[in-house]
Image (cartoon, helix red, strand yellow):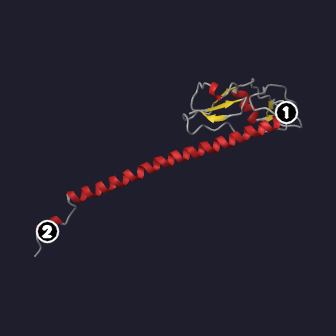
Amino acid sequence: MFSLRNSRNQEGFTLVELLIVVIILAILAAIIVPQFSATTDDAKQSAYDSNIANIRSAIDLYRQQHDAYPGALTSTGTCPGGMTNQAGALNTEAAFLAQLKFYTNSAGVACNGTDATFKYGPYIKDDLPVNPLGNPGISTVDVGNAGLLGLTSGTSGGWQYDTVTGEFIGDE
């Protein structure tokens, strides 16, 4: 004979069973979530290492071709044939970026085109990448000429660069 009481007991889980499942899920979440956090930090560090290596390589190549670091020479000057000058005063972010992003002559004058005189560069294709370990969205370069320890950054989280030593670091 069919008992109403037995069928009611078989309809669902007990409170103890549900608590055990919830506790197991909480333990698994506590183990897995920190792994995602560590992976994010590792990815940011890898991006930083890659970005800084590429920028330092560009700076070194510029130094080999011009016998000075980018930004240590003014990028202001006359460009031939309708090319536009990418002006930047000595020891400024504008000169640093212009000399890495555009074609330059041996004196460091940066133009948006190339000819027999403006045969060097460009050393980077786009703007500098954002420092992944710094403040989000900041890609500025604090350029100085007194050694990195003498630099003070108005926008921390970008990059720091010294035109005398060629040192390039992340400003965290």
Residue matched to label 1: 106
Residue matched to label 2: 6
The first of marks 1 and 2 along the sequence is 2
At horizontal 73% and vertical 37% (from top left) the residue drawn is: 59
Residue 16 picture quarter: bottom left
Q: Is residue 125 visible?
A: no
At horizontal 64% and vertical 42% (from top left) the residue drawn is: 51
Q: x and y percent of residue 155 in the render?
A: 58, 27
How packed mark 1 is, by other alpha carbons closer than 10 Å (few <14, some 14-19, many 20 or more), is some
Residue 126 picture quarter: top right
Q: Is residue 18 above or below residue 170?
A: below
Q: Quadrant of the C terminus?
A: top right
Mark 1, secondary structure of its residue: loop
Q: x and y percent of residue 91 in the render?
A: 72, 25
Mark 2, secondary structure of its residue: helix
Q: Is residue 13 visible?
A: yes
Q: x and y percent of residue 111 in the render?
A: 80, 32
